Amino acid sequence: MPKKPSSPLRSLARGLVRASWHKQNLYNIFKKEAYRRSASLYQQKWESKRETRAYHGEHMTENNWLGIFQKNLVGAETLHDKDDKSSEREPLPVGLQLYAPVERRLDMAMFRAMFAGSPRQAREFISSGKVKVNGSKVKHGFYPLRPGDVFSVEPECVLTAVGREKPSDGLSKDIDAKQLEAFNKFKESCREDPRNMFEQKFMPTSVDGPYDPDRLYKKVRAMTVENLTNKIQGLSLDGVSADELTARGKEEVEQYRNEFQANGNVAADDKSISQLATQFFRLDNSGSNPSPEAVELLKKIVERRVDIQQAELQDLVRLFRGAATVYDARWYYAYLEEYCGSALPWQDGAYGLQDISKPYFTPWTPRTFLAPFAIVPWHLEISYKTCHAVYLRDPITRRGHSEVISPLPLYMHENAYLFYVRDRQ
Amino acid sequence: MPFSTRNILVSTARGLSPGQSSTSGSYTQVRGVRIGPGSYLNRDYGLVGRHTLPRSHMIQWFGEKGLNGDFYKNPYCYAPSDHIPNYIPHTSSKISRDDIVKKMADPNYRKNVNENTYKPFPLNPYTKTSFLLSEELREAILQSCRDPKMSLWQISARYGIRKERVAATVKLAKIENQWENEGKITPDLARYAHRMYMMMPITNGRLSQNTLADKLGEEPLEEIVPPKTAQRNNIQIMHETAKFSPEDAASFFHAPEAAELMDRQLYSDMPKAVSFQGVKDKELVKKIKQWKGRYTDVVFKGNNIWTAIPAKVGKVGYRYGASRDHRKKHRKHKDERLNI
């Protein structure tokens, strides 16, 4: 009979961290803090054991765990580490090897390979015959893997575990009704004020706040030669660290200063303008230079040949932001009923029920709150296309790094080890 | 139910930070407060008295729900697709959810990639994520197996990936090819594989060393992991006159013999070019050149040169303190057997 959880799996009062992708578990991880209660040694050991066992092998009974518990904890050294006797060496977190035997189990390995949302769900897949090891079906979650073993899961199970929940017919209808209402409102506002809606859609908000054409206009108007020269004069090498400014960068800044002092003018280089433009518009696209048109326009501004107007400002912003579309008063026609029908253009069929025969949300999308748990294990090699994985070797510990994945601090594992070593003696 | 006017502690925690007490807040006068058995309904002021206080804090942490029920404003809701993980950040000070939301709104947030970006749990700095092999690296490894065919050890040393992982990659590639030919990879499965690949961090190993991920993804190849057989108590009782050879030791530890290891491809495939610029003794250089390439590589460590040379068991070293050599004339000893 599988072991039932001794305490609620997602209790907020206890705040125990579990091996699970549930969003409440994520909240418990976020909320958890490392503390050392001023308690007796036995109380500390007991609490460490409670916390660590809640994550590592919670689905195992205590006797099963004690059967695979190993007293000898071993770390790995490299050839160079042996000779390096400096005090700056990273510590060897051997305590984290305590729960390494649990990672050998098939259900735990499936959870680590992200084929199941928790070891309990993995055990369900295993007991229903959906899992094979080296080509043969294995129906027990405790199956201990050996280095070189290849285990595989049926893709439908993995897609159900990792994907969104399939909505019921009623829920799908409700969501579609809400989406339709919002979409109709959007189309109405497009008809009333197409220019404003275009800017909202294609001019994304910046860090400072929402897109404000007046503010940007003032900024560019202020971008006269005087202000630019002040900016260049203000570039001092004192505030900038040596790593940031290369030798070449320092030369350029000094060159500007000398030119300004000599001529009272700014040399309108393509490179210098693009550098200043990044400061002004806080561009994200590092590595890619602005287009030649944008650079030319800015050159003209710098040389006071163009008195920039509101409309030109928007073109400038568009050029620098890299928006592909040019404004057209009929830009929203693609969304209207007379052209695309009454269906929602981004959806084929009902919400989440594109293919009703599948047990998961279709078209397949990953479940929410998956990213904080997306850890690539060191002791497995995974193929997501075929839902196969290879157990490379038992997880080991080296200087500054442990292959055993655990959200809990090292001292908790060490205390738990002390608890179990005493028990075994 | 009796009501009264009281000064009540109103919880101002909008998004509880770790360590923050749930009873923090300010005092304010409230009318219509329940006293007596129904007073448990007073606790929630932000939400209608349906939830306990910890649960109401959790609901505030998740944030607003969208049309389809997603907590779309929560920074951890959606999976990224730029190979940069989206973990709970490592910070020394206590950080609240609102601070994280502000941080993540900054377009430069995901560009400040450092070692802590690849550590998923703030309480455990020893747990780090590994890296998937990028498509280029994977293709390079598979190409190395075809023509010209390199050995496992050579591929491992060239790309900075452990040999077990190289072998596993080749194995899984065969299975993928088979599935593609049989048409088993459905569109949903391909979509899933693509999303997972884009979400996880990738490395190019030693192919290119441009990003931090490439440097962190280079695995340590020179590790000594003590075999499990060597971790036990190794006491074997044997007769006084019985001999214990290296073969017996190998079978006891269930490990390959040293001679077998030496003959393996590792040593024959290792680079045979060794520079002798540091060595001043030319006679010694001549002798080393005779040994080079036949046994193991030559290692320069400190002021010494080390290499393995053939020697017979029983003739290596000298048994000091044997019963024959305890007299005064034997105290000065010069070993001439190795002829160095």
Image (cartoon, rainbow, N blue to C red):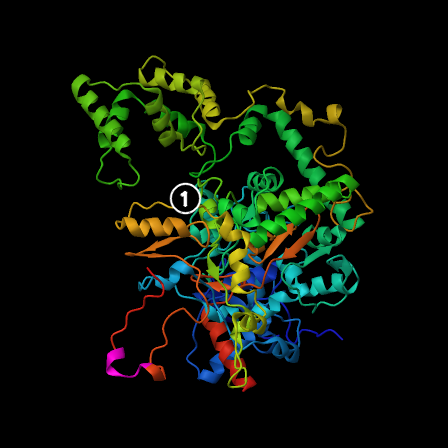
Where in the figure is residue A106, as x and y percent of width and height? 68, 64
Q: Is B48 left or right of A249, judged from the image as shown?
A: right
Instruction: Return the chain for callout 1.
Output: B
Residue B317 in magenta? no
Q: Is A104 left or right of A340, judged from the image as shown?
A: left
Between A68 and B75, the one lying in front of the other is A68
Where in the figure is residue A4, as x and y percent of width and height? 70, 74
Between A72 and A203, the one lying in front of the other is A72
Q: What amino acid type is highlighted by mark number 1? A: Ala
Specify the quadrant that holds the N terminus of chain A. Answer: bottom right
Which residue is pictured at 59% across the width and 41% down the height?
B149
Asked whether the viewer can see residue A382, the reply is yes
From this view, report whether residue B258 is shown above or below residue A420: above
Between A46 and B296, the one lying in front of the other is B296
Prevailing secondary structure class for the magenta stretch in the rendered image: helix
For disc 1, the neighbor class at 10 Å (few under 14, some 14 to 19, many from 20) is few
Residue B328 in magenta? yes
Q: Which residues are magenta?
A: B325-330
Q: Looking at the rendering, which quadrant does residue A181 occupy?
A: top right
Between B216 and B235, the one lying in front of the other is B235
From this view, report whether residue A76 is shown above or below residue B332: above
Read off the residue under disc 1.
B273
| Residue at the outermost top position | A305
